[in-house]
Image: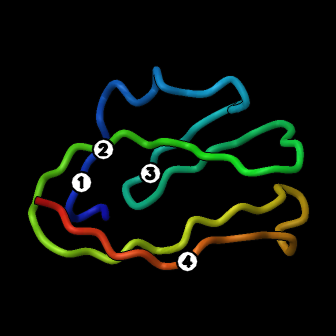
Amino acid sequence: MSGACSYDNDSQSNWRSIESYREQFRQKTSIYCTQLAKGNYSFDVQLIARYNGSYTLNPAKVELMYFPTFFGRNEIKKVKVK
């Protein structure tokens, strides 16, 4: 999605209380949490659309910082930007 969108400048203020730190790179956003209990979580990244078209989103990946062999991810998704 880095070709279709850019980050919204106000996205830093939308952090949730469980987040310790957030880094925004050109192609991804890394969100760090000190501790997460078992369950489902949703994190929002505010974007601004730049170009129209159909795009493929790579799966979001969650892993332990010191044991990256334990990880989980969701499925590939298709997105249309209008």
Residue 68 in the image, given as x and y percentages of width and height? 82, 68
Give me the disc on residue 43. Answer: none
Q: CA distance from mark 1 to mark 2?
A: 6 Å
- First-in-chain label (1 vs 2): 1
Q: Which color scheme did the rendering employ for the protein?
A: rainbow
Residue 53 in the image, given as x and y percentages of width and height? 13, 71
Residue 15 drawn above or below residue 25: above
- First-in-chain label (2 vs 3): 3
Q: Secondary structure at mark 3?
A: loop
Residue 4 drawn above or below residue 76: above
Check disc 1 and give the amino acid type.
Cys
How busy is the neighbourhood of tag 4: few (under 14 within 10 Å), some, or many (20 plus)? few
Q: CA distance from mark 4 to mark 2?
A: 20 Å
- First-in-chain label (4 vs 2): 2
Hey, which quadrant is residue 54 in on the image?
Answer: bottom left
How busy is the neighbourhood of tag 2: few (under 14 within 10 Å), some, or many (20 plus)? some
- First-in-chain label (1 vs 4): 1
